[in-house]
């Protein structure tokens, strides 16, 4: 099996596990607030983080090199998790994924002011087409936009912002700093927000919160293996396989059906994203590949192993 085939296989496995991760979020979201789910999945992630940090031999402290960028990314990551968990709780899985797939389009837009990138006319048109696909999914005017839709759009934007900041400071900032600050903020802020809406959790639901952490950890390891073996141009598009898992899980576990606008809109968004990946790969220069260099699921607040992906000098 070729390295690219191995990379694609690990990526498909990773995103299948991530889809299962999101199913558990949706399951708990039917009973508990997103604050409570995030708090306990974050709490149960700390042992996994501790084992990861025991292997970190990098010299230095936990003071950020770029405190303002780190603060902005931390805020974006925390709000992103809240938005994503809420969207998965109230929207059909396939519809949520279709909107979240807009993140690479937003990364391309944000790369202009934050990274100083130049986006050519073809990639620019691809972004416009992809955003039209988002409008097809949302279909404003024909059906009321819910808080869940707004949360999914917010998650796509905040996830893109978090990813592009990581792209900007990742070579100078320690991975442990980028990992711990959002986790600590989640634990403190979400813990406070959880207090007024807390519901006692039976052991099975508490275990499900732990499963969110474990699945995120295992999926992250598979994603690392994918990028170590395959080229980013092969691995990155595999994320769109989640729409198939969303359709399967949504139908058999939650009785959801996928409507025509979601299918059409998702197809437009996916095609635009794949085109952007193809255009970036043709450029070759690292400074022109903000999407290809973004290798993480940014809305996983419990345990994000992806910042530890290392590709040469690149740590984001």
Image: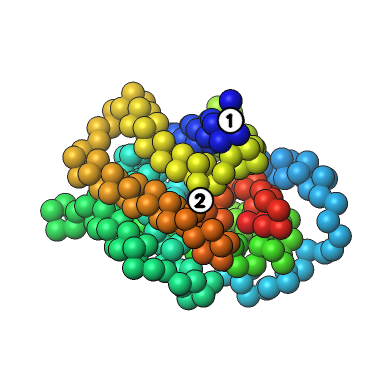
Residue at figure coordinates x 68%, y 73% from the top left: 66
Residue 296 picture location, percent across and down = 56, 49
**253 relative position to 220: left or right:** left
Residue at figure coordinates x 43%, y 63% from the top left: 108
As drawn, 211 above or below 110: above
Q: Around disc 2, counting alpha carbons within 10 Å, would you say few (fewer than 14), some (14 to 19), or many (20 or more)? A: many
Residue 236 picture location, percent across and down = 49, 45
Q: Which mark is residue 313?
A: none
Residue 17 visible to an observer of this rendering: no
Q: Around disc 1, counting alpha carbons within 10 Å, would you say few (fewer than 14), some (14 to 19), or many (20 or more)? A: few
Residue at figure coordinates x 27%, y 49% from the top left: 268
- Dot 1: what SS? loop
**Which of marks 2 and 1 precedes in the sequence?**
1
Residue toward you, 233 or 72: 233
**43 relative position to 142: left or right:** right
**165 relative position to 158: left or right:** right
Q: Nearer the viewer, mark 1 or mark 2?
A: 1
Residue behind mark 1: 2
Residue lying at the far left in this picture: please name it.
Answer: 142
- Dot 2: what SS? loop
Residue behind mark 2: 299
Q: Quadrant of the C terminus?
A: bottom right
As drawn, 37 above or below 23: below
Separation of marks 1 and 2 at Cα, in angstroms: 31 Å
Residue toward you, 310 or 143: 310
- Which of the colour schemes (rainbow, by chain, secondary structure, one colour) is used? rainbow
Residue 259 visible to an observer of this rendering: yes
Residue at figure coordinates x 62%, y 48% from the top left: 306
**Which quadrant of the view contains residue 224?**
top right
As drawn, 273 above or below 169: above
Residue 65 picture location, percent across and down = 73, 71
């Amino acid at each position: 099996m070729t390295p690219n085939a191995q990379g694609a296989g690990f990526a498909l496995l990773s995103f299948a596990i991530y889809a299962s991760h999101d199913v558990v979020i949706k399951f708990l979201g039917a009973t508990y607030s997103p604050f409570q789910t995030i708090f306990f999945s974050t709490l149960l992630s700390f042992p996994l983080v501790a084992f990861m940090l025991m292997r970190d031999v990098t010299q230095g402290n936990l003071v950020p090199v770029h405190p303002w960028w780190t603060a902005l990314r931390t805020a974006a990551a925390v709000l992103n998790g809240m938005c994503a968990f809420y969207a998965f709780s109230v929207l059909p899985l396939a519809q949520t994924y279709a909107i979240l797939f807009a993140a690479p389009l937003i990364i391309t837009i944000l790369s202009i002011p934050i990274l100083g990138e130049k986006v050519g006319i073809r990639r620019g048109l691809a972004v416009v087409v992809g955003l039209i696909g988002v409008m097809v999914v949302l279909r404003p005017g024909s059906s009321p936009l819910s808080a869940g839709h707004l949360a999914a759009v917010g998650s796509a934007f905040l996830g893109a912002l978090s990813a592009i900041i990581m792209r900007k400071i990742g070579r100078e900032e320690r991975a442990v700093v980028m990992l711990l600050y959002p986790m600590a903020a989640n634990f403190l802020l979400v813990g406070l927000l959880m207090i007024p809406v807390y519901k006692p959790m039976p052991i099975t639901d508490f275990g499900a919160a732990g499963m969110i952490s474990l699945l995120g950890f295992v999926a992250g390891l598979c994603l690392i293996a994918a990028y170590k073996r395959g080229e980013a141009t092969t691995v990155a598009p595999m994320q769109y396989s989640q729409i198939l898992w969303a359709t399967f899980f949504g139908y058999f576990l939650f009785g959801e059906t996928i409507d025509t606008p979601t299918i059409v809109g998702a197809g437009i968004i996916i095609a635009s994203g794949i085109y952007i990946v193809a255009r970036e790969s043709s450029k070759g220069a690292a400074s022109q590949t903000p999407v290809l260099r973004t290798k993480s699921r940014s809305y996983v607040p419990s345990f994000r192993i992806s910042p530890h992906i290392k590709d040469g000098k690149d740590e984001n």
